[in-house]
Structure formats: C-alpha cells, structure tokens
Amino acid sequence: MTYVLQTYGAAVLRHKAEPVDRVTAAVRRLADEMIRAMKKHEGVGLAAPQIGKSQRLVVLYHPELHPKPLVMLNPEILKRAAEFFELGEGCLSLPGVNVNVSRPSAVRVKYQDLKGAMRETEYEGLMARIVYHEVDHLNGKLIIDYLPLDQRLRFEAQIKRARHPTRATGEKPS
Ligand code: NI
C-alpha cells in the first residue's frame, strides 16, 4: 500500500472520520503503514485522515515518553484536566507551521487496541497533548483552528498565495 501525506487544503482533513467497526487485516496493515509514515516523517503522532483514510485510527509515539508505538482505534476523550498549558505545536499536514495551542494538562482516553480490546488510559503533559492533537484530526480539526481569527485568515491567505504563485506575480501559467 502506498500513501500520500495529505496537507492543508485536502478535504479529507476536514471530514469527521468514520468509526472502525472491526479489526480486519486491512486495519492492521493501515496501522503498520501509519507507524512507518509517522517515523519516516519524524512525527510523534499520525491520524488516518492524514494519509487519506477517513477512519478513526491514530498512532502515537514519543522517543522518551512512549518509545513503543501505540495504536488507538475509535479513541474517545472521557475526561480532561481543568488545568491547561500552552505549547508550540506542529503538524505533518501543515509543513513549516508552528502554532501555540492551549490544551488540558491531562486526559483520560478510551480506545480499542488492535486486538479489539477496550482500553482506558490517562496521559499527562506532552502525551496528553499528542492524544488530543490526533483526536482533533479525527474530528476535522487542525492546529490553525486555535489561532485568533485575524491570524488564521492571514495564514490562509499565505497558503493560497503559495498555491497560486502565477496569480500573485502575474506570470503566465506554463
Ligand atoms: Ni497533525
């Protein structure tokens, strides 16, 4: 299976992803592929929509905090800490972009593992942030959505100009 990393502007990144009903061989292959893609692009997490699959599947990894890649099917945030903290975040779907995002300092998440077993785990700090970021992807939400409106509009205009340089510079398209 080959994948294409989906970047800002791809419709799939804005869809609410579909639940994974059954753990099939195809789901396991997709999880493997996502772990490979995440590591290749040096990410600490990846959601299926980011490789064009609108399914509720995420993979997470952190060299120190969680060296063994974690696969979550249908993750659901059950509880979040009242305390928030802000940190700069990047996203493989928004190359070169870093946005300060305020997120809860801890989350309790329920998910299914690749054997189909239900699990519930609590994460703190950076891991909680990664879980949150990936669950956002499943709901069509991106880090730029956390920006104040004026900054977000400026960012979107920048992306559009980068996509259509001929329009901005008046050069003829070739
Ligand atoms: Ni992301």
Image (cartoon, rainbow, N blue to C red):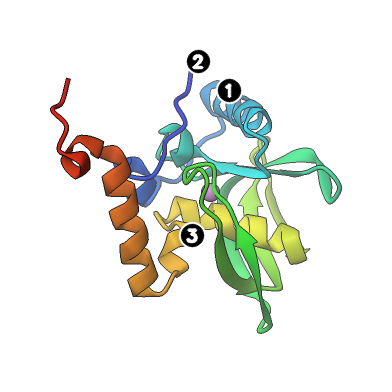
Q: Which mark is residue 119?
A: none
| Distance (Cα) linking label 1 and label 2 | 8 Å
Question: Mark 2 belongs to which amino acid?
Answer: Met
Give left or right: position of 137 versus 38.
left
Image location of residue 11, percent across then percent down = 30, 43
At a point 41% along the width and 64% down the height, the residue shown is 145
Give left or right: position of 26 versus 118.
left
58 or 172: nearer the viewer: 172
98 or 24: nearer the viewer: 98
Residue 52: quarter of image: top left
Give the residue pinned by disc 2.
1
In this picture, is 24 found above or below 19?
above
- The reply to whether residue 15 is visible in this rendering is no
Question: Is the C-beta of the residue carrying label 3 under 8 Å from the nearest atom of ligand 1?
Answer: yes
In primary-sequence order, the first of circles 1 and 2 is 2
Q: Which mark is residue 29?
A: 1
143 or 107: nearer the viewer: 143
Q: Residue furthest bottom?
A: 82
| Distance (Cα) linking label 3 and label 2 | 28 Å
At a point 56% along the width and 32% down the height, the residue shown is 23
Image location of residue 22, percent across then percent down = 52, 35
Marks 3, 1: nearer the viewer: 3
Question: Mark 1 belongs to which amino acid?
Answer: Arg
Marks 1, 2: nearer the viewer: 2
Q: Residue furthest right?
A: 64
Q: Which mark is residue 143?
A: 3
Q: How crowded is mark 1: few (under 14 residues within 10 Å), some or many (20 or more)?
A: few
At a point 63% along the width and 34% down the height, the residue shown is 38
